[in-house]
Amino acid sequence: MSISRRDFVRNTSLTAAGIPFISKQNLFMNPLADKVRIGLIGTGLRGQNHLDLLLKRADVELVAICDVEEKMLQTATKQIQDSGKPMPKIFTGDANAWKKLLEIKNLDAVMIATPWEWHKPMIIGALQAGIKYVGTEVILGITLQDHWDVVHAAEQYNAQVMMLENVCYRRDVMAVLNMVRQGLFGELIHLQGGYQHDLREVKFNDGVHPYGHGVEFGEKGFSEAKWRTNHSVYRNGDLYPTHGIGPIANYININRGNRFLSLCSFATKSRGLHNHIVKNGGENHANAKVNFKLGDIVTTQINCVNGETILLQHDTNLPRPYSLGFRVQGTEGLWMDVNKSIYIQDKSAKNDVWDEAKLWLEKYDHSLWARWSKETAGAGHGGMDFFVVHAFIESIKRKTATPLDVYDAATWSAITPLSEQSIELGHQTIEFPDFTGGQWMYRKPVFALNDEY
Ligand SMILES: NC(=O)c1ccc[n+]([C@@H]2O[C@H](COP(=O)([O-])OP(=O)(O)OC[C@H]3O[C@@H](n4cnc5c(N)ncnc54)[C@H](O)[C@@H]3O)[C@@H](O)[C@H]2O)c1
């Protein structure tokens, strides 16, 4: 079936109405598929989290897994054995083994949890193989062109590409979404968020442990130290924007009545990673000579067509407790997650005094959490990981658009190359591309409108 770009972009916003993007006939023939046949590419630490969630679901048939590392596959196959589910086909041996996995007949979907640089070729490969649902871990591609390529491929093959942005489903983030939608903050004016996570012991390890115990990276590193750290060597920008921007984009309906207009980024000097190597490996360690291009703190400002501003921070190289630093501020009040507080004019207990956020967050708990919180027990990142996989699988079963779509994925991930460009050009303000081709004006919000998925 061929479909015009305009129809595709419009149709991806029809989920809420329950209108299928593939065809009505399909929907009526099979209103709710009972089993989803799925392949998983990448069984590293994140892939193993997804595996755990997939194995718990009665509506998932895990058909195949793929990885290039024996150690990761061993852990994954043990997980599968322990679950009592049948062993899927295993694809390994070389960096292109995933292409063979895509040749399996009747795969409903693939999930991808590989290093960032593999996402684009694997997504596009899956679409070309005729797979209609691709769930990819965060960061769609590397260059701006990568993001366009994935958008165009999803349109060409009339398929869904969902970025598995789990923070959109965090319990407090969703309660605040509920509050935003009920108008408690008034009209939104300014938002903040980011990725503020000390990754020094993720970027360096001893090649055995995933976190710390050494200062190796690249070929001598294990898990993310093997590939992620090189991005800090060669790139300077907001390398991980989606955990912060995803929730923010949902609050202000980006690509659905609103859009990002332009962006400007600044980066500090780079000290944290070098200091970590010297402190833990000594100044004579070979890695003490590496020049890291990534500034320790990268700050990005974005403005929106509806008049909001956004401040995003990427802060991964310095000692600090974890915090995504959300702030959602409107004409009536604001939420700040770092000090766990909310203030709403005329509704808070005292004038100009913070309320404990908990009181509001419990009162406005999102219906998804209220319904499914039992199922989240044991799921990663405080339970939110359950919801992102749940949303992906339920969309497939209904043959409908995913609640986070390829335009969301491209728009959020494109912040990385745009911020690099801004910094490279001396903090120039860069125009934000419109991946929807003007359809943002007509598309309607679909994310988490009810308690289903
Ligand atoms: N959403 C979240 O909260 C969250 C958390 C952690 C990681 N992630 C994302 O998940 C992705 C994977 O991260 P990770 O922590 O699992 O890293 P990892 O290094 O532990 O796992 C990546 C896996 O991909 C495999 N791989 C590499 N090249 C491959 C190829 N050509 N074919 C098949 N497999 C290949 C590696 O062998 C490894 O097992 C990244 O995009 C990361 O940003 C997201």
Image (tube, rainbow, N blue to C red):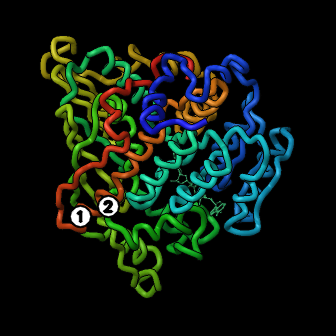
Label 2: element kind: loop
Which dot marks residue 136?
A: none
Camera sees residue 169? no
- Does residue 191 appear to the left or right of 160 in the view shown? left
- Image quadrant assignment for residue 350: top left
Q: Determine whether the beta carbon of the residue marked 2 sits less than 8 angstroms from the nearest atom of ligand 1.
A: no
Residue 264 figure quarter: bottom left
Q: Residue at x 82, y 47 (%)?
A: 88
- In the picture of the structure, the residue carrying the numbered disc 1 is 423
- What is the three-letter code of the residue carrying label 1? Ile
The CA span between labels 2 and 1 is 7 Å
**Residue drawn where x is 23% and y is 21% of the image:** 185
Please rate how many residues cluster around mark 1, counting C-alpha atoms within 10 Å: few if below 14, some from 14 to 19, many from 20: many
**Which residue is nearer to you in this view: 386 or 68?**
68
Asked if disc 2 and disc 1 are in contact, CB closer than 8 Å, the reply is: yes
Give the image quadrant in which the ligand numbered 1 is located: bottom right
Q: Residue at x 36, y 74 (%)?
A: 292
Q: Which residue is mark 2?
A: 237
Residue flagged by tag 2: what amino acid is it?
A: Gly
x and y percentages locating residue 187 in the rendered image: 20, 22
Q: Nearer the viewer, residue 339 or 414?
A: 414
